[in-house]
Image (cartoon, rainbow, N blue to C red):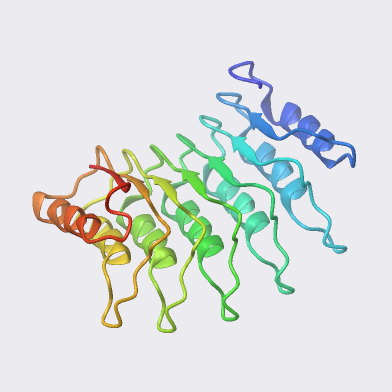
Amino acid sequence: MCTGVDIGHEGAKALARKLEQKDCLIEGLSMVDNHIGEEGAKALAVVLTPNAEGVFNTSLNTLNLRGNEIGREGAKALAVALTPNAEGVFNTSLNTLNLTNNAIGPEGAKALALMLTPNAEGVFNTSLNTLDLTYNCIGDEGAKALAAALTPDDKGVFNTSLNTLNLYRNDIGDEGAKALAVALTPNAKGVFNTSLNTLDLKFNHFGDEVAAALQEAVRMHTNAATFKLVI
């Protein structure tokens, strides 16, 4: 744990080198408020990315980068690291990613959404189950991209891994919240996302009508008894 010790991007690079070692046993890494920036995030992304031989760090399952100013480019680098490559290979170890307060914006959210979205072959990251994007100003644009990733496509395929999504305080209005409600609502074929069971949308900017639509979607959800909706 390296909380608030201001290790900067050079410290992040040093930790990345440690994670590259074959005997690395680090399972959780908390680097809260360390000013690692875009450069530090990119160094960590390299370690999480399968190389030409398909090798990547297999010990790390939790990464907390809250308050590190990684921006949209840092978020994009991490998203690419976790997105299946052309051969369908991806990082199968990381299951929890916290990017709270990193100014990733709509573009960063879109990149993360792409990682969660089944590709043409139906392949997507099946390891990540918790994504915390609290206070990142993703807006409706970012929320709609994430919602699309979680909504069943024409073939009924959707992300079946993510179960916790935190979008607290993200400037999300009616459009973004409606899109998330659609992901949880049965489509014409009766298919809907049955994996997500925790969605935090507190302190956003959607109206009562959309809030009611979200509540109704959860009420009719397969996991209604255990689904945690915070609005």
- Nearer-the-camera pick, 82 or 221: 221
- Nearer-the-camera pick, 171 or 162: 162
Q: Residue furthest front?
A: 225
Instruction: Give me the residue at 56% from left, 76% from top.
Output: 122
Quadrant assignment for the N terminus: top right
Instruction: Give me the residue at 70% from left, 68% from top.
Output: 85
- Give the tally of numbered discs: 0
Q: Residue furthest top?
A: 5
- Nearer-the-camera pick, 201 or 205: 201
Left or right side of 105 for 183: left
Where residue 191 appears, x then y in whole percent? 34, 75
* Quadrant of residue 33 within the rendered picture: top right
Vertical placement of 124 versus 223: above or below?
Answer: below
Where residue 20 appears, x then y in whole percent? 84, 41
Instruction: Give me the residue at 46% from left, 40% from top.
Output: 103
Q: Residue furthest left?
A: 209
Left or right side of 22 for 198: left
* Quadrant of residue 204 within the rendered picture: top left
Instruction: Give me the residue at 38% from left, 62% from top.
Output: 194
Left or right side of 6 for 100: left
Vertical placement of 78 versus 84: above or below?
Answer: above
Where residue 146 appears, x then y in whole percent? 41, 59
Vertical placement of 83 versus 226: above or below?
Answer: below
Quadrant assignment for the C terminus: top left
Where residue 155 appears, x then y in whole percent? 44, 83
